[in-house]
Image (cartoon, rainbow, N blue to C red):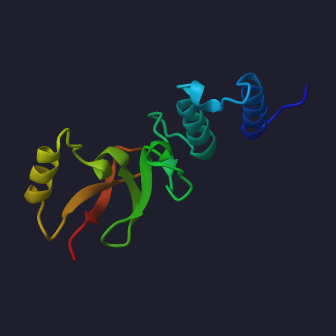
C-alpha cells in the first residue's frame, strides 16, 4: 500500500471540495479554514511531551498557524521558546480596554519567560518592547 504525505492528501481533498462546490468557492465550508490551519500546524511543527507544538513562526501563514511555543533568543543570547499566549498577551474586548492595556504598559517594555521546548522549564528571559 502506497503512503501519501499530508500535502498530497490535502491536495486531493482541495480538488474534491472545489469540484463539489460547483464554482461557488470554498467559503461555503465554514470549518474549512480551521481544517487547513490544523493540517498546517500538525505537519510543520513537532510536539513536545505535553502536546504543545514548537518551532519558528517564520512559516506561519497567520497567527492561527503559529506554534504553541515560538522559537526566540533571550536577552543573554539563550535560544528557547516563548509561549504564544505570553506573546499575544491580554486581548481587549473593547476599544476602551485596548487603550487601558496600552496605557498600563511601561515605555521600557516588559519581560516574559523563555522556556525549554518542554514548555515548563524556564531557561531565560525575553524582552518585549521598549528601546
Q: Please state if 70 lies on the left or on the right of 3 as rendered.
A: left
* In the rendered image, the vertical position of residue 61 relative to residue 5, given as above or below: below
* In the rendered image, the vertical position of residue 82 relative to residue 85, given as above or below: below
Q: Position of residue 68 (x, y in %)?
A: 43, 43
Q: Please state if 64 lies on the left or on the right of 102 as rendered.
A: right
Q: Please state if 21 lies on the left or on the right of 106 as rendered.
A: right
Q: Position of residue 98 (x, y in %)?
A: 17, 49
Residue that sits furthest to the bottom in the current view: 131
Q: Residue at x 9, y 58 (%)?
A: 103
* In the rendered image, the vertical position of residue 19 relative to residue 62, given as above or below: above
Q: Please state if 13 lies on the left or on the right of 111 as rendered.
A: right
Name the one closer to the observer, 120 or 81. 81
Name the one closer to the observer, 72 or 15. 15
Q: Position of residue 6 (x, y in %)?
A: 72, 36
Name the one closer to the observer, 120 or 2. 2
Residue that sits furthest to the front in the current view: 23
Q: Residue at x 20, y 38 (%)?
A: 93
Q: Residue at x 48, y 49 (%)?
A: 62
Of the 4 image quadrants, the one containing the C terminus is: bottom left
Q: Residue at x 72, y 34 (%)?
A: 10
Of the 4 image quadrants, the one containing the N terminus is: top right
Q: Position of residue 124 (x, y in %)?
A: 30, 61
> Where, by quadrant of the figure, is residue 38 drawn?
top right
Amino acid at each position: 500500500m502506497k503512503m501519501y504525505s499530508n500535502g498530497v492528501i490535502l491536495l486531493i481533498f482541495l480538488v474534491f471540495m472545489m469540484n463539489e462546490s460547483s464554482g461557488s468557492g470554498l467559503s461555503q465550508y465554514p470549518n474549512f479554514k480551521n481544517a487547513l490551519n490544523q493540517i498546517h500546524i500538525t505537519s510543520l511543527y513537532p510536539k513536545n511531551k505535553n502536546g504543545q507544538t514548537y518551532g519558528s513562526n517564520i512559516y506561519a501563514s497567520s497567527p492561527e498557524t503559529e506554534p504553541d511555543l515560538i522559537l526566540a533568543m533571550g536577552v543573554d543570547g539563550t535560544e528557547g521558546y516563548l509561549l504564544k499566549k505570553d506573546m499575544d498577551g491580554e486581548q481587549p474586548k473593547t476599544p476602551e480596554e485596548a487603550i487601558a492595556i496600552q496605557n498600563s504598559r511601561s515605555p521600557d517594555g516588559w519581560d516574559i519567560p523563555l522556556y525549554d521546548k518542554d514548555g515548563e522549564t524556564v531557561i531565560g528571559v525575553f524582552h518585549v518592547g521598549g528601546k
